Amino acid sequence: MKARFIIFAFALPTAATAQSYSESMADCASFYQNAAQWVRTDEKAEQIMANTRKWHAAAVTQARAEGRPVTADAMWDKINAKTDAWEAKGLGFAFTQEFRDWASYCRKFAKHTGVDLTF
């Protein structure tokens, strides 16, 4: 009787398991939504929230393009939950390298995906 061996190949995480663009867009929306509460003027807060709304719209459109039908309200729920996580870091977070890294990432991601942010 011949011995038979079965070889299992375990793949490392690939681009297929990477976070979707729509999820990253929701992350950036929540990042901006959180930042809006820490600025000094209502005018600046509104400008930041306008960018939040742009990220939200892009996330909804992208999620649908990815084959995941999502409502605008469901995307806001996701963004608001992510914003809660940012808020838990407190005001001091705005002075960290992580904050600067996220700000840079979201600006570059906006340029890459055509989300027209205003500053």
Image: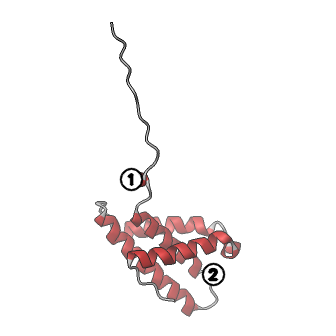
Q: Which amino acid type corresponds to the residue marked 1 in the rendered image?
A: Ala
Give the colour scheme shown: secondary structure
Q: Residue furthest top?
A: 1
First in sequence: mark 2 vs mark 1: 1
Between tags 2 and 1, which lies in front? 1
How many C-alpha atoms fall within 10 Å of the one at disc 1: few (<14), some, or many (≥20)?
few
Residue on which disc 1 sits? 16
Q: Residue furthest front?
A: 2
Q: Secondary structure at mark 2?
A: loop
Foreground residue among 21 and 82: 21
Q: Is residue 119 above or below residue 79?
A: below
Real-space Cα distance between discs 2 and 1?
36 Å
Residue 35: x and y in percent read 58, 78
Tally of numbered discs: 2
Q: Is residue 5 above or below residue 44?
A: above
* Residue name at image x 67 percent, y 71 percent: 97
- Quarter of the picture holding the N terminus: top left
Horizontal side of residue 61 vs 39, given as left or right: left
Q: Is residue 51 above or below residue 28?
A: below
How many C-alpha atoms fall within 10 Å of the one at disc 2: few (<14), some, or many (≥20)?
few
* Residue name at image x 44 percent, y 58 percent: 19
Q: Which amino acid type corresponds to the residue marked 2 in the rendered image?
A: Trp
Label drawn at residue 95 = none
* Residue name at image x 56 percent, y 90 percent: 44
Label drawn at residue 38 = 2
